[in-house]
Each structure stands twice: as C-alpha cells, then as structure tokens.
Amino acid sequence: MKSSLTYGQLKQAAEKFGTPLYVYHAEKIVSQYQNLVSHFDMTQTRFFYACKALTNIHILQVVKNAGCPIDCSSINEVKLALHVGFEPKNILYTSNSVSFDEICEAVALGINVNIDSLSNLEKFGAKFGNTYAVGVRIRPNIMAGGNLKISTGHDKSKFGIPLTQFNELKTIQEKFQLNINTLHIHTGSEIKEVSVFLQSADVFESILGEFPTVQVLDFGGGFKVPYTPNEKGTDIALLGSEVNKVMKKMSEKFGRPLIAWFEPGKYLVSEAGYFISQVNVLKEQGEITFAGINTGLNHLIRPMFYDAYHHIDNISHPDQPTKNYAVVGNICETDTFAWDRPIPTISEGDYLVFYNAGAYGYEMSSNYNARYKPAQVLLEKEEAKLISRADDFADLLRLQTPLNS
C-alpha cells in the first residue's frame, strides 16, 4: 500500500470541496496500466479496464487516453464507454443473468460480447447463427479470491457455463455453427497466487482443440492490490512472464495465433482513490474510544459487506502519538469501519482518509438514510477538479412524483 498523494494535497482537497469526498489521482491510474503493459508481451495480450470498479466518465477518459480498452458488465456501462469515445472494437461486454434483449442491444452496437449461459447462447445462435463472433464464459470450478463473496469460479457460483455442461455447449455450437472466438474464465477478485491464472490456462488447453475458431483466451481479472501497509499484491512481473510462455506454447501447439485478455478493475483504480471524512464526535466508553465520522456504509460499504480492511490516517494531525479507536459512521446501522485501530490522536473536526478507495467505493454508494452521495474530485497534473458534485435535497426528490399528483 503506497500513497501517491501527500497529506497536504488530500487536506487541501477536503478544505476546498468539503467532505465526505472521494479523490482520485489520474497519474496513478496511468502508471498502474503502464506497469501491466511493461510486463506482458503486448503482441499477444490485451487489457480491458473493468469499469464496474469506477464508472465516472472522467475516470473512463483517463483510461482511454492511456490506451487501455474497457470491459463492461451492463449495457449502460457500454453506453458510458461509447459516450466517452471508446471504439466498439475496444469495448468488451461480459453479461451475467441478463435478458437476451440486452445482448441483442450489445450486438447492435458492434462490441465484443461474452455470454455466460446456455439459454442465452442458444437464443444467440437462433438469431445470429455464425454471423457475429461471440465469446463464452466458462466456469472452471476453481476456488479463488479474497473471500467467498468475491469468488466467482467455484462449483456453486452463478457465473459462467460449468464444465460439467461442456457437451451441451458443444451441441449448441454445432447446431448453429457458432463463431466462438473467445473462451473466458474469471475465478474471483484479490487473487495473489499466479498459479490460479495458470490453472485457468490448463482448462483452456484441455478444451481448446474443440473450438477451432477461438482466437482469444480471456483470463478475467482479479489482480490483488495491497490494502495493509506491509501486504503484497499479485506479482505482475511473474504473472506476465508465465502468461507470455503459456500463450506462446499454446499458439504453437494448436497452430494458430492466440491472444490473452485480462480485465483488471481494482488494480487500475483502487490505489489511486482516497476517501476523506471528518470527525463529528469522540465518545469515550470504557476502554473504547469511538470516532464518529460524517459518512457511513452508504458511502463506503466494503468494510461491512466484504469485511475489507482500509488503512486510515489522520491527515489533520499525522504526527500525533497513536491511540486505538473504533471508527464508526453516522448511519442508523452498525457501520463500523475499523475496530481497535491505531491512528494518530484524533480531535473532533480532524480529517481522516481511507486508502484504497478508488474501486467499489463511490460505485457502491447509496442514499440510505436519505443522506447525500459525496462529491468526487480528480487530481491530474497537480490540478484538482470536480468530476461529480455532491447530492443536494433536490436530488433526493428528483425521481419521486409530487404529492397529490
């Protein structure tokens, strides 16, 4: 876990734009992408930013300008990508549990499409035959990821077509002469072990001979980023070296050029994001000191939903002696961000920053308790600009019909 912004920059943003506040560092996003590119053979590899992590159009523009294509999990994410200016060929749409109408809309937009159910694949074949290349998402029955909630490749996961239904998949392919150009596997998030990706490669190798039209082996995403100060993330250099060798070997074995695709989301934006709050109250309760802040699970739900750790600093007084606190929110729930956490001594009014807040922070926020969503700020070339304002009361009423209407 490394900070690319200083306490001073974060405090200045808080004072200028108010809190709670999300701050993103554009140059960090670009450097994360460049780190990936530097360790893989880019003649046989493509990365697509998994934009479900953070969809603000200004962030998407940073990604696009860096030269990175984009991965979308809904048709509206696709429309956001097109709005920003991504070319259809640089947009990947990987569906799950969606209507066939949404898949048809994706096809009409000319983008890359992955399908993850036999039902939709059969409908696709009946409508399009072999006129539109399509990818299929395979469930490999591999347990991986930081915890069960973010593990997507195991035998009880909703995602993908299980290998146990391989014969049914082949029957549909042959029935409609489908042009299956991509095999896709995504086993989960926060995957530290390079061996997990190599397991996916083994699955690909075992079935690739049955798919002569496949050109792309899609390994999904899930690269781990460090959350605690001494934690290690995925060894990208090792992963790149191993994938480069595997792809070369399989291309030679099957007599056709194959390309690896990956969809990193958290890896690109997590460490580039910071969430700043302000301390409303301090409550001494026996051995526990509660620091109650002006935000809650409505703005950053990961600690409650995933039991995720986010490092917390006091950017108002970073040099004070540390004291242990329970950092809690202002929502009418038990929204505890940290328990018994050592933090530089806190006073009411101090700013606290949560690190690794760029992925699945604002994106999973809500108006629970009729609280306003926070503003978002992008710091690029030393300049901080507002990229989405905070809600106001009018926003709470905007979608509701008037009384007595």
Image (spheres, grey):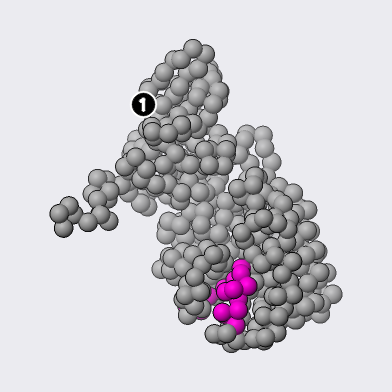
Q: Which residues are magenta?
A: 109-125
Q: Quadrant of the N terminus?
A: top right
- The residue at the point 75 percent across, 81 percent down is 212
- Side (left or right) of 271 relative to 377: right
Quarter occupied by residue 373: top left
* Residue 130 horizontal/vertical position (percent): 62, 86
Front residue (pair 168, 116): 168
- Side (left or right) of 236 relative to 72: right
Relative to 338, say whether 210 is above or below: below
- The residue at the point 72 percent across, 78 percent down is 170
Q: Which residue is mark 1?
A: 280
* Residue 188 horizontal/vertical position (percent): 65, 53
Relative to 383, say whether 331 is above or below: above
- The residue at the point 60 percent across, 83 percent down is 125
- The residue at the point 44 percent across, 39 percent down is 297
Quarter occupied by residue 261: bottom right
- Specify few, some or many for label 1: CA neighbours under 10 Å numbering under 14, 14-19, or 20 or more: some
Can residue 303 be seen in the rendering of this structure?
yes
Front residue (pair 366, 404): 404
Front residue (pair 196, 241): 196
Point out the residue furthest to the top here.
286
* Residue 227 horizontal/vertical position (percent): 60, 39
